């Protein structure tokens, strides 16, 4: 009896999957930068899914269109703000980012490889950690709040100059143990609802959960400008929201736990293009 | 031994002035995923159950399941099977087991356990993101489970 019901359920579930797909669409930004929004899954997750897909494919047509042109992308206003900050001297050393790094376009190729192992510090660093390290140790300036506006703006600038380049974080060597910790977190069922990232973003992408169309929960588009809160949202703020929604005690943005989770989630998008700042609902 | 429990139950029940005792979340007995007895000791109210199934603040079952009878509630999810006909497919005891703790019927199910208070990893205080405190209780009360079961039993095709 139980077995039969199982088979019956399976049939029902398959039908549901079949009707819920990401859209068939392609993204070219400013008629210039071709964005890879779906590609073969990296080897380490080939057991789980065949293809990895950007969250862009799961949004409605109006939201998708906003990302096709920088004039329509509200996230680009924050990139301009960060460009000003890039050139403004701050802190006891009287230096700006530009004093050492020249133009912000010198950062092309940096976003796709973060989080990244830093040999001197002996730790895996997110882009946010690296930016604050430059502020504190090289500029003599106050660190920015991890998920605050100044920080989100700067990460948007650094993402924007890498748009179109493939995400390519290293998961072996000294980063491996951190990556493994992140993978464990991804499959851990947290909170009173006992839901893991994988329950929603691996087993059910393409399906509706109440009013939301579930994506693969990729981070190649971060920071994201969300129509819901009309600001840039950082990776760890998004993670925090998703963990909270399982009725769990969340981790702190910037914590070693979220750094590990970020490395792992980033690696699930290896091969997708950097597209931040992206637009989401 | 059995006598003593029964006897003390009777005392407890009469002391509280209730007709039957409520079964605590930690004391529910599952048999092949089913729960034979009413958790509250009372019959369920299908009209209340209908509200719980559709309400975001209560069962929020429609987050994952579509139900034709609840077409007045917007946005039904498609994570689990449609609940139309659930009253034909499952007995009352099976439905009670599924709603109380679906993982007993469907191993590893994504469906949350609505009448369970132990064994969680990083349980929180509702949707605050903070750690659970002494206000922590099951997602639904014993009577709410009974109400939902009564409603599901009405879903016939």
Image: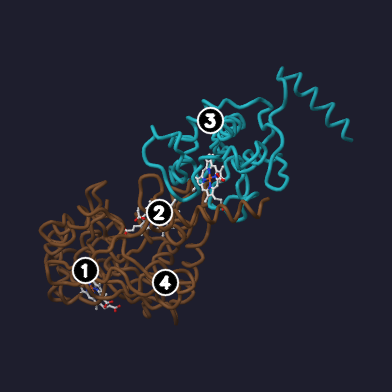
Mark 1 closeness class: few <14, some 14–19, many ≥20 residues within 10 Å: many
Q: Which mark is residue A207?
A: 2
* Among the 4 quarters of the image, the one containing residue A266: bottom left
In the picture, measured across the screen, residue A155 lies left or right of residue B68, that is left
**Above or below B138: residue B49:** above
Q: Which residue is mark 4?
A: A50
Chain letter, brown: A
Mark 3 closeness class: few <14, some 14–19, many ≥20 residues within 10 Å: many
Indicate which disc, 2 or 4, sits on the residue closer to the N terminus.
Answer: 4
Q: Chain of mark 3?
A: B
Marks 3/1: CA distance?
A: 51 Å
Q: Nearer the viewer, mark 1 or mark 2?
A: 2
* Among the 4 quarters of the image, the one containing residue A110: bottom left
Identify which residue is drawn at 67% across, 38% down. B93
Considering depth in this image, is B42 or B71 the residue closer to the camera? B71
Q: Which mark is residue A158?
A: 1
Chain letter, cyan: B
In the orientation shown, which residue stands out farthest toward the top?
A: B17
Q: Nearer the viewer, mark 3 or mark 1?
A: 3
* Among the 4 quarters of the image, the one containing residue A138: bottom left
**Above or below B76: residue A99:** below
Indicate which disc, 1 or 2, sits on the residue closer to the N terminus.
Answer: 1
Q: Which residue is mark 3?
A: B49
- Disc 2 element: loop
Marks 2/3: CA distance?
A: 26 Å
Q: Chain of mark 1?
A: A
- Disc 3 element: helix
Mark 4 closeness class: few <14, some 14–19, many ≥20 residues within 10 Å: few
Q: Are marks 2 and 4 on the same chain?
A: yes
Q: Nearer the viewer, mark 1 or mark 4?
A: 4
């Amino acid at each position: 009896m139980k077995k039969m019901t199982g088979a019956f359920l399976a049939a029902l579930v398959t039908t549901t999957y079949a009707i819920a797909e990401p859209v068939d669409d392609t993204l070219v930004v400013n008629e210039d930068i071709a964005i890879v929004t779906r590609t073969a899954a990296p080897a380490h997750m080939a057991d789980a899914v065949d293809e990895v897909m950007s969250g862009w494919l799961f949004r409605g047509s109006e939201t998708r269109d906003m990302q096709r042109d920088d004039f329509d992308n509200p996230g680009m206003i924050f990139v301009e703000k960060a460009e000003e900050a890039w050139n403004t001297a701050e802190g006891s050393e009287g230096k700006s980012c530009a004093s050492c790094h020249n133009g912000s376009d010198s950062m092309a190729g940096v976003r796709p490889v973060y989080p990244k192992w830093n040999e001197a510090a002996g730790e895996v660093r997110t882009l946010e950690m690296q930016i604050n390290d430059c502020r504190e140790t090289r500029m003599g300036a106050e660190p920015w709040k991890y998920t605050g506006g100044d920080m989100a703006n700067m990460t948007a600038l650094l993402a924007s100059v890498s748009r179109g380049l493939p995400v390519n974080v290293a998961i072996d060597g000294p980063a491996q143990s951190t990556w493994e910790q992140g993978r464990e977190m991804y499959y851990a069922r947290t909170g009173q609802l006992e839901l893991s990232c994988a329950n929603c973003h691996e087993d059910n992408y393409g399906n509706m959960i109440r009013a939301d169309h579930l994506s693969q929960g990729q981070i190649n588009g971060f920071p994201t400008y969300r129509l819901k809160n009309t600001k840039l949202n950082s990776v760890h703020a998004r993670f925090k929201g998703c963990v909270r929604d399982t009725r769990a005690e969340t981790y702190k943005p910037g914590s070693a736990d979220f750094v590990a989770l970020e490395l792992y989630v980033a690696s699930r998008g290896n091969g997708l293009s950097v597209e931040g700042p992206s637009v989401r609902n | 031994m059995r006598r003593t429990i029964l006897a003390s139950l009777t005392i407890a029940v009469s002391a509280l002035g209730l007709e039957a005792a409520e079964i605590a979340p930690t004391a529910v007995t599952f048999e092949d995923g089913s729960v034979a007895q009413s958790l509250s000791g009372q019959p369920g109210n299908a009209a209340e159950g209908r509200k719980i199934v559709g309400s975001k603040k209560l069962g929020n079952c429609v987050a994952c399941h579509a139900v034709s009878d609840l077409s007045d509630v917007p946005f039904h999810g498609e994570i689990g099977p449609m609940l139309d006909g659930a009253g034909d497919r499952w007995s009352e005891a099976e439905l009670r087991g599924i709603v109380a703790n679906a993982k007993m019927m469907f191993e590893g199910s994504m469906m949350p356990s609505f009448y369970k208070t132990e064994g969680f990893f990083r349980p929180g205080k509702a949707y605050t993101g903070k750690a659970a405190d002494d206000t922590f209780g099951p997602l639904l009360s014993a009577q709410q489970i009974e109400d939902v079961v009564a409603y599901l039993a009405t879903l016939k095709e």
